[in-house]
Image (cartoon, helix red, strand yellow):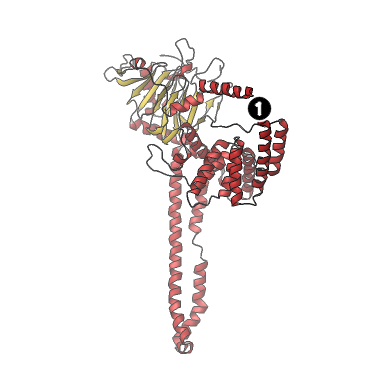
């Protein structure tokens, strides 16, 4: 199981003993350690000379938008150039010192063989006085000269644009999310063996250890175990690293214990003690594990067949019931339901003129059916590359953390299940945006004046939008109050980029997966003609595994033309 349950305690007394024993000997929990790390960070900021540079990064959240991460690559390139300049300056300085040393080495060798004869030459006597009085002082100044001033100044300037702890944690969580959604084992991810990659990269043992630590601070012991094991595996295979097996085993044994595998936790702790017999926490944990193991053996003797039967019934229920999260992840991997041949025969492609719209009678657009119920259609070649670039350039300076509408208050707020950045564009701002709005209106017959502004979204590392409805339900009367619009009749979604792997739009209720294709748009109705919501339109944006996903979405509309 992905998230194993904790060890079953024989009695409430055992639980009390457990807490007391861990307080005395055990590792602190991930959440507690995370709090302590935060306290340390806050206290250290008070004395850090650079603490005032942190605040600009707090609202940027680089990992949400690849455009901002592209800026970081340019920043890092600039730092590398500055570093190389510093290295050249140091090499030049050392070269000068080396030449001086070689010259004097040869001179002193000659002089020491016959000091009196050497100094009998008045020029040699003068030059000796000059060297010791002047030139050695100049050499001392050269040796003491700090060549790092330029590099340090550049670092100080660039530091204000650096990501912070929140960015690093967000990027780590994104990797873990991708691992779960696309069912990737740690070794595959560590070695960078992903589909469609152009620039292969790999994770070091130290990187794996860092991922495990971040999972640990979130009390995510499942991923802590996976990544600590990967770090240990790479070290066992001979990788040279600064990561320490003792630290890895310390985290790993506790994470395994928290998931209920006492035997494995004891085995790992024994291995830790072989490396460091005096490790205080490991010795304390071992005593505690042995104590719990003895208690469990006593409890197992009194277990009944009824418990076994209950477990079997629970397992049957688990197999019969497939939760939405599992469906969503399966669809993201392309493992969705396959249409029967009979249903597939109902799907067509056609030239569409927007119900005899004058603009499209002579030049209809290409349209194809993606799904039958709910009906999802795709328009091909519906937005040009030039229009896409214009929309992206307009949106980039405005991109902010995407929000959702609070179903109770109608207020816009961020949510952990929507991880992307978005910007809103109005038709009056650009003739391109106005032209796009007109196109949507002509082809759908919906009045875009009652639609929301054009929403442009970019999904960064592991960006996603978990299953949701685009329309407001009956129990959400104020869902779109703040937006000043009525309920959303339909959704039109442009795809403004191709995606190498991942990034599908999926409908868990019906098993549909719609994959991004640059220059296309998909359209579906959220409401029935009666105004009732179509619950089969519940959909999600899968995280991008490899590549960059841009989309724009005017959420239509509160009335027809």
Task: Give whichever of 549, 78 is nearer the camera.
Answer: 549
| Residue 433 screen position, x and y as percent | 39, 27
Q: Residues within 10 Å of mark 1 (few under 14, many from 20)?
A: few
Residue closer to the observer: 496 or 25: 25
- Above-or-below relation of 380 to 144: above
Quadrant in which the C terminus is drawn: top left
Q: Please tell me which residue lies in front, 77 or 21.
A: 21
- Residue 51 visible at all: no
**Going by the image, does 113 lie left or right of 282?**
left
Figure label count: 1
Which residue lies most toward the top here?
530
Judged from the image, the secondary structure of the residue bearing numbered disc 1 is: loop
374 vs 288, left or right, is: left
Front residue of 347/101: it is 347
Q: Is residue 307 visible?
A: yes
Residue at point 55% right, 24% down? 315
Q: Residue furthest front?
A: 301
How far from the left and from the top, in percent, is residue 478? 56, 18
Q: Which image quarter is the N terminus in? A: top right
Q: Is residue 8 left or right of residue 100?
A: right
Q: Position of residue 443 (x, y in %)?
A: 36, 18
- What residue did someone put label 1 on? 303
- Give the answer, above or below, for where 510 lies relative to 392: above
In this rendering, the answer to whether 184 lies above or below 247 is above
The image quarter containing residue 188 is top left
């Amino acid at each position: 199981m992905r998230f194993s349950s904790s060890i079953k305690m024989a009695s409430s007394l055992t639980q009390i003993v457990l807490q007391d024993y861990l307080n005395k000997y055990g590792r602190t929990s991930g959440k507690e350690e995370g709090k302590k790390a935060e306290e340390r960070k806050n206290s250290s900021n008070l004395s850090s000379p650079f603490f005032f540079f942190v605040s600009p990064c707090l609202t940027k959240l680089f990992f949400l938008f690849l455009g901002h991460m592209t800026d970081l690559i340019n920043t890092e390139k600039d730092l590398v150039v500055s570093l190389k300049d510093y290295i050249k300056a140091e090499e030049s300085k050392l070269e000068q010192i080396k030449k001086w040393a070689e010259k004097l080495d040869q001179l002193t060798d000659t002089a020491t063989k016959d000091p009196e004869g050497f100094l009998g030459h008045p020029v040699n006597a003068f030059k000796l006085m000059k060297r010791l009085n002047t030139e050695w002082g100049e050499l001392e100044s050269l040796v003491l000269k700090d060549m790092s001033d330029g590099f340090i100044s550049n670092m100080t300037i660039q530091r204000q644009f650096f990501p912070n702890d929140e960015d690093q944690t967000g990027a780590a969580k994104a990797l873990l999310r991708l691992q779960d959604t696309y069912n990737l084992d740690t070794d595959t991810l560590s070695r960078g063996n992903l589909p469609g990659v152009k620039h292969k990269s790999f994770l070091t043992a130290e990187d794996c250890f860092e991922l495990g630590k971040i999972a640990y601070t979130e009390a995510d012991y499942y991923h802590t175990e996976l990544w600590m094991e990967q770090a240990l595996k790479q070290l066992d295979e001979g990788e040279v690293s600064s990561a320490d097996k003792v630290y890895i085993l310390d985290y790993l044994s506790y994470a395994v214990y928290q998931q209920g595998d006492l035997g494995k936790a004891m085995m790992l702790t024994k291995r830790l003690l072989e490396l460091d017999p005096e490790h205080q926490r490991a010795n304390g944990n071992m005593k505690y594990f042995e104590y719990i193991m003895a208690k469990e053996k006593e409890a197992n003797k009194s277990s009944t067949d009824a418990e076994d039967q209950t477990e079997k019934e629970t397992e049957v229920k688990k197999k019969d019931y497939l939760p939405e999260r599992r469906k969503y992840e399966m669809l993201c991997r392309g493992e969705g339901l396959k249409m029967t041949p009979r249903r597939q025969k109902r799907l067509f492609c056609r030239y569409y003129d927007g119900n005899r719209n004058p603009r499209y009678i002579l030049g209809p657009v290409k349209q194809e059916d993606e799904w039958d119920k709910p009906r999802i259609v795709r328009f091909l070649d519906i937005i040009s590359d030039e229009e896409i670039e214009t929309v992206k350039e307009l949106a980039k300076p405005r991109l902010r953390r995407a929000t959702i509408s609070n179903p109770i208050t109608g207020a816009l707020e961020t949510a952990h299940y929507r991880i992307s950045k978005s910007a809103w564009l109005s038709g009056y701002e650009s003739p391109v945006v106005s032209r796009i709005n007109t196109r949507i209106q002509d082809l759908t017959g919906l009045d875009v004046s009652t639609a929301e502004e054009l929403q442009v979204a970019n999904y960064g590392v592991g960006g996603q939008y978990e299953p949701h409805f685009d329309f407001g339900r009956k129990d959400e009367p104020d869902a779109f109050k703040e937006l000043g619009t009525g309920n959303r009749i339909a959704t039109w979604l442009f795809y403004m980029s191709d995606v190498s792997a991942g990034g599908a739009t999926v409908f868990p209720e019906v098993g549909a997966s719609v994959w991004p294709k640059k220059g296309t748009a998909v359209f579906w109705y959220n409401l029935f003609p009666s105004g009732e919501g179509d619950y089969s339109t519940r959909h999600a944006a899968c995280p991008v595994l490899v590549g960059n996903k841009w989309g724009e979405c005017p959420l239509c509309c509160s009335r027809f033309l």
